[in-house]
Amino acid sequence: MAKDKKLRITLVRSTIGEKPKTRAAVRTLGLRKIDQVTERPDSADLRGVLAQVAHLVEVEEEGGGGVRSGRRTPSASLRSAPPPDGEEDA
């Protein structure tokens, strides 16, 4: 991992109902509120913390890299699900 590379981290889900260890990991990243953004230098330690809270954050690499998230957006999950049996679009 390049030392000059930075990661842009956004808190996209609340920590309400999460275990104290998970809440502490989010606070370690410097995030408190939903939609708050922080930039951190890329490192193996940071990647480990992000792996613990992947379902709560979105991560972008500096320079227009792709967005990585541990969660699926509701619209994407709804579109991929087939309709239940007996129900068809009219």
Image (cartoon, rainbow, N blue to C red):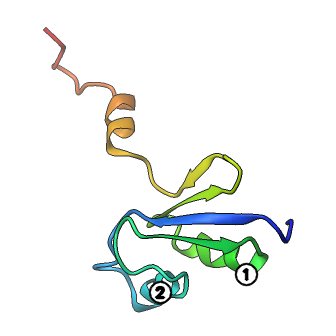
Within-10-Å neighbours for mark 2: few <14, some 14–19, many 20+: few
Q: Quadrant of residue 35?
A: bottom left
Picture quarter with the N terminus: bottom right
Disc 2 marks a residue whose amino acid type is Arg
Label ID, residue 23:
none
| 71 horizontally vs 79: left or right | right
Q: Residue at x 59, y 63 (%)?
A: 8
Up/down of 84 relative to 32, above or below: above
Disc 1 marks a residue whose amino acid type is Asp
Q: Residue at x 32, y 44 (%)?
A: 74
Alpha-carbon distance for marks 1 and 2?
15 Å
Q: Residue at x 68, y 77 (%)?
A: 46
Give percent across and percent down for residue 78.
Answer: 31, 35
- Residue furthest left as drawn: 90
Disc 2: which residue: 27
Picture quarter with the C terminus: top left
Q: Residue at x 34, y 69 (%)?
A: 34
User: Which of the marked residues, 1 or 2, is nearer the chain's N terminus?
Assistant: 2
Disc 1: which residue: 45
| 70 horizontally vs 88: left or right | right
